[in-house]
Amino acid sequence: MAITKHAITGVPLNDITYKRKRLNQDEAVTVHILAKEGNSFTDIVQRLGTNANRVGEVRRGEVYPESAKIALNLLMK
């Protein structure tokens, strides 16, 4: 990931390379896998390029409720 600096302040900024407005089922499964692997909530949000509300909905089972079980099955292989 390239780091640029703000033109006025010189503060280092991370480049945003991918943005998601919503998550699909595979991405929801990935949320659970990343969490089981020890990634923080904030890191999951940033790595998937979405917002905290989308990740929270997945983690609470409000959307793609089956994704947690799918993730567990994949991790058990």
Image (cartoon, rainbow, N blue to C red):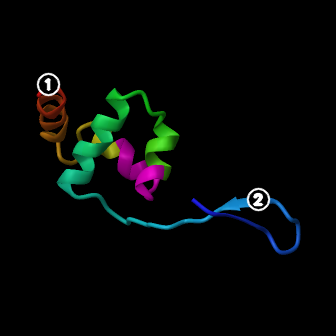
Tag 2, which secondary structure?
A: strand
Magenta segment range?
47-56
Q: Residue furthest right?
A: 9
Reply yes or no: does residue 53 show up in magenta. Answer: yes
Quadrant housing residue 44: top left
- The percent coordinates of residue 29 (x first, y second) are 22, 43
- The percent coordinates of residue 43 (x first, y second) are 50, 42
**Residue ID for mark 1:** 76
- Magenta stretch: dominant SS? helix
- The percent coordinates of residue 15 (x first, y second) are 60, 65
Reply yes or no: does residue 3 show up in magenta. Answer: no
Quadrant location of the C terminus in the rendered image: top left
Quadrant location of the N terminus in the rendered image: bottom right
Q: Residue furthest bottom?
A: 7
**Residue ID for mark 2:** 12
- Could you tell me which residue is drawn at 44 percent across and 66 percent down? 18
- Could you tell me which residue is drawn at 14 percent across and 34 percent down? 74
Dot 1, crowdedness within 10 Å: few (<14), some or many (≥20)? few
Looking at marks 2 and 1 on the same chain, the residue that comes earlier in the sequence is marked by 2
Say which of 29 and 15 sits in front.
15
Side (left or right) of 55 relative to 58: right
- Above or below residue 52? Residue 73 is above
- Above or below residue 36? Residue 13 is below
- Could you tell me which residue is drawn at 46 percent across and 55 percent down? 51
Three-letter amino acid code of the residue under disc 2:
Pro
Three-letter amino acid code of the residue under disc 1:
Met
Say which of 71 and 22 sits in front.
71
